[in-house]
Amino acid sequence: MKPEITTPTSEYAPEFALRLTPTPRGARLARLLAAHQLRAWGLAGPAVEAAELVVAELANNAVQHGRVPGRDFELRMEREGEHVRVELSDARGECRPLPSREPDEGGYGLLLVATLATAWGVRDRTVGKTVWATVPRQ
């Protein structure tokens, strides 16, 4: 499936959104396209790297824990003052993310998100949930 870009990719558009298949390829495309958009917005260096890591982790979680056959996940990013708000929505609202206090082979991703973001959380949708994080632009 081709990614469906619902808003234009440009340095002037304050919002970027696309829907992708909940596969490892979809998660990788989310990270790559998010990095492209962040650079189009003029972000560079650690700001892009932090936002890219947050997108990668949340997209990976959407693929691994939020997958419902036949349903896409959605990536949305918005410039908000000194932050970029990253949102990943999937179709499984009952599967809420919780960072592990003592991760074994996994569970470090949300600790990474919490470290890189100034805030993060989860909100319900009519179908599924949205995991969001705000990442500093500098």
Image (spheres, rainbow, N blue to C red):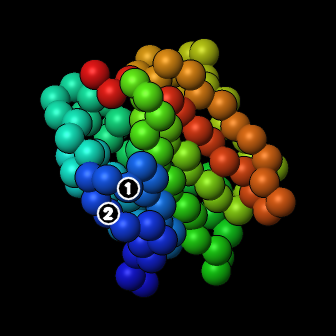
Q: Nearer the viewer, residue 92 or 20?
A: 20
Tag 2–tag 1 contact (CB < 8 Å): yes
Q: Secondary structure at mark 2?
A: loop
Q: Which is closer to the viewer, label 2 or label 1?
A: 1
SS of the residue under disc 1: loop
Q: Is residue 9 above or below residue 132?
A: below
The residue lying at 47 percent from left, 34 percent from top is 80
Inspect the image, locate mark 2, and give the three-letter code of the amino acid beneath it.
Thr
Residue 13 has which mark?
1
Q: Residue furthest bottom?
A: 1
For the residue marked with disc 1, what is the amino acid? Answer: Ala
User: x%, y% of residue 41?
Assistant: 26, 45
- Residue 34 in percent (x, y) is at 33, 52
Residue 13's place in the image compared with 57, above or below, is: below
Quadrant including the N terminus: bottom left
Residue drawn at x 83%, y 60% is: 126
Please give the residue where the numbered disc 2 appears in the rendered image.
9
Q: Residue at x 42, y 72 (%)?
A: 5
Query: At 62% across and 42% down in the image, what residue appears?
Result: 131
Q: Residues within 10 Å of mark 2 (few under 14, many from 20)?
A: some
Q: Nearer the viewer, residue 100 or 134?
A: 134
Mark 1, other Cα within 10 Å: few <14 / some 14–19 / many ≥20? some
